[in-house]
Image: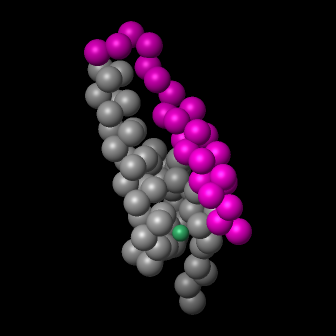
Amino acid sequence: MTHEISCKQLVDLVADYLEEAIPDEARAQFEQHLSECGYCSAYVQQLQVTVTLTQKLSESELDKPAPKELLSIFRKWKQDQNLD
Ligand SMILES: [Zn+2]
């Protein structure tokens, strides 16, 4: 039986997902949600682009930007959308 996750739970998991620190079961639920929710799918895509850009930048910068900080910004943005 699949336990579906909500948009809010997805946002809570996204940092672990992008860092590949997410458990297999949660990853499956996460990807299941993405396949059914265009909003979250677009959100995660944006986040992946941002994290990729950040990682590219960090190769040439002495100070590494913290992806977690970016994620918290997106998290707040998501909360502001009033998804509940
Ligand atoms: Zn969603």
Residue depicted at 51% across the width and 28% down the height = 66
Left or right, 11 with respect to 55, comes to right
* Outermost top residue: 62
Percent x, y for residue 83? Answer: 65, 66
Percent x, y for residue 32? Answer: 45, 75
**Residue 26 magenta-drawn?**
no
Residue 20 visible in the picture: no
State the image quarter where residue 9 is shown.
Answer: bottom right
Residue depicted at 60% across the width and 47% down the height = 77
The number of discs equals 0
Quadrant of image for the N terminus: bottom right
Residue 21 visible in the picture: yes
Percent x, y for residue 52? Answer: 33, 38
- What stretch of residues is rendered in magenta? 60-84
What colour-coding does the image apply? one colour
* Outermost front residue: 81
